[in-house]
Amino acid sequence: GAGVSQSPRYKVAKRGQDVALRCDPISGHVSLFWYQQALGQGPEFLTYFQNEAQLDKSGLPSDRFFAERPEGSVSTLKIQRTQQEDSAVYLCASSLAVRGRAGEQFFGPGTRLTVL
Amino acid sequence: DAKTTQPTSMDCAEGRAANLPCNHSTISGNEYVYWYRQIHSQGPQYIIHGLKNNETNEMASLIITEDRKSSTLILPHATLRDTAVYYCIVRSLEGGSQGNLIFGKGTKLSVKP
């Protein structure tokens, strides 16, 4: 069966460029999470959606980061005016569970962003 | 959510059991212990979770001490494909919790032939 997919798998951007990273969650999954993983570190939470509602964006590092999930399925993480410190793997995860309940999160393969 | 402490790295011989420890001494009564692993260049993969009782599935067993301050993930017959970073995570089920995972640095398990 189809898992979580992300595109592109690799993205190279020049400093100052805008990028858009896409996540296709598992069909029917209510919850969607974005994480950022720097080299040699564990993933760090960025933002959370329940259906189309962005319920938590406390992990977004700056106002250059923006995420949306307009129809409650596909989500896009946008980074404006990229900086070198934005270089990382961006992971998307989806879960059948709703807020307040534990549930297994299914992760995509990630998008490796390199900012030159 | 409670913090966890794991060894930075471990080695295991192929075919032997791999026992990965995790300390979570500040865990509270409604927090679950979750284990995920991340194989190189892939996203994390769920392994198992538990609250109080020991758990077993097709991938692994989870042993939680009676005081719940530590746990051990057991891979009964490690293969080369089990080489990965293993993350022990404690998750709250409080009403406001949305379930995002708080990863540490995990344990790098190397399974050797």
Image: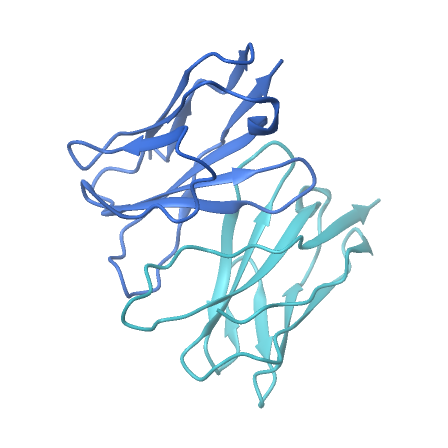
Instruction: Give the colour of chain B.
Output: cyan
Residue A31, percent across and down?
28, 48
Quadrant of the frame with the C terminus of chain A: top right
A21 horizontally vs B2: left or right = left
Please indicate whether residue B102 sits to the left or right of residue A54 in the image. right
When the figure is inspected, residue B99 is found, relative to residue A50, above or below; the finding is below
Q: Left or right: B111 with respect to B89?
A: right
Residue B99 against residue B41 in the figure, above or below? below
Q: Nearer the viewer, residue A15 or A107?
A: A15
Q: Which of the image's four quarters has the N terminus of chain A? A: top left
The residue positioned 62% from the left and 80% from the top of the image is B25
Give the residue at x 19% y 44%: A51
Task: Looking at the picture, tell me which residue is in the foreground, A109 or A52.
Answer: A52
- Give coordinates of residue A98: x percent, y percent: 24, 57
In the rendered image, the residue lying farthest to the left is A71
Q: Is residue B57 visible?
A: no
Decide: is A31 above or below A115: below
Residue A103 placement (x, y as % from top left): 35, 59
Q: Nearer the viewer, residue B89 or A49?
A: A49
**Number of callouts:** 0
According to the colouring, which chain is blue? Answer: A
